[in-house]
Image (tube, helix red, strand yellow):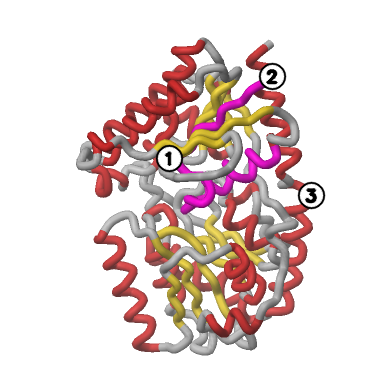
Amino acid sequence: MRIDILSKEYPPSIYGGAGVHVAELVRALRQLATVRVHAFDGPRDEADTTSHPPLAGLADANPAIATLGVDLAMVSACEGADVVHSHTWYANMAGHLSALMYDVPHVVTAHSLEPMRPWKAEQLGGGYAVSSWAERTAYEAAAGIIAVSGAMRDDVLRSYPAVDPGRVKVVHNGIDTALWTPTANPDRVRELGIDPDRRSVIFVGRITRQKGLPLFLRAAAQLPPDVQLVLCAGAPDTPEIKAEVEALVEDLRATRGGVVWIAEMLPRADVVALLTQATVFACPSIYEPLGIVNLEAMACDTAVVATATGGIPEVVVPGETGWLVPIEQLHDGTGTPVDPAAYVADFAAALNEAVADPDRAHRMGQAGRQRAIESFSWPAIAAQTLEIYQSLRD
């Protein structure tokens, strides 16, 4: 069986959880079947991997239109595939059209959904209507849909009621616990501006509305002054959210030391070193289908404080591997807290409980790593995914 994987992100161009998922899934699937990858941008020198750069004629087009141009270029490259499997709306239309052209099953993995991210209209303008159309069309026609959590499956069926529930299967995200493993490197941590001998709270993620960074920064203001705040945060969606985050960071720096903001994308070894030394990892997301970042932290023996939303409760076990912060959210697709001040106060309380007892937090981190090993391995996820492909070919 030849499986063609279609994705915007693929190494070395990864900026989010979907890209991590694709890279790890491909690596595991290639132990079981023939896999070809089609990814945006490039160039890449990996065997059976094709890079598709933006079309020159669409260089000045809305990003959504430029995306569809790349999708069209991908279609001809998929000839000969037995199954096409697309990831995120960026590649969904390439999978949909390939299925029509070559009469093969199209599988979609639901990492996130456009109806759940209406703030993207700030970023794409009218292109958000285009991306929403592309996603809806692909989902409603797909032979199979893989949701990365039970909560994500519920979101798919709620957002796209025309989809047959029998076509939506749950296969969790995974983590390579050989690559993400506790690795102390105090010298490198110091080079990055953090004191490894002091308590710290770390955030790793893009600067987007869904990641909840502004809410987290407000909560962090309530931490003891000796607790360091480490922000591995870049790739802002819009100038507005970038400016908001910059202002909040400056407010924190005006009243406390130990606020370290690393805006560039760090290599995995540096992220592992930072996670390993952290007292606790913070995930203040208001929309998170599963949250690979939580698994990465857990695999590094780091306890997690996270929002009880989306698929996060399927990963973080409160009182065992970390803390889940309750949230009541608006039902307008944004995930915005009904009472932002209450959510910030609750998140701050959980953070303070975590840093107040570093030994307890470390025990939770160790339990988190064990959970990651036992429940979220990529070989098992690849095997489940292959079973879905095979069922669609029978």
Crowdedness near tag 1: few (<14), some (14–19) or many (≥20) residues, C-alpha within 10 Å: many
Position of residue 120 in the picture relative to residue 392 (left or right): left
Residue 154 visible in the picture: no
Judging by the rendered image, the residue that carries numbered circle 1 is: 40
Q: Is residue 387 magenta?
A: no
Q: Is residue 3 magenta?
A: yes
Crowdedness near tag 2: few (<14), some (14–19) or many (≥20) residues, C-alpha within 10 Å: few
Judging by the rendered image, the residue that carries numbered circle 3 is: 374
Residue at 45 percent across and 13 percent down: it is: 100
Say whether disc 2 or disc 3 marks the residue closer to the N-terminus. 3
Position of residue 314 in the picture relative to residue 155 (left or right): right
Residue at 41 percent across and 71 percent down: it is: 217
Which three-letter amino acid code belongs to the residue tagged 2?
A: Gln
Residue at 63 percent across and 16 percent down: it is: 392
Marks 1,3: beta carbons within 8 A: no
| Mark 2 and mark 1: Cα distance apart in space | 27 Å
| Mark 2 and mark 3: Cα distance apart in space | 25 Å
Judging by the rendered image, the residue that carries numbered circle 2 is: 390
Instruction: Quadrant for the N terminus, please.
Output: top right
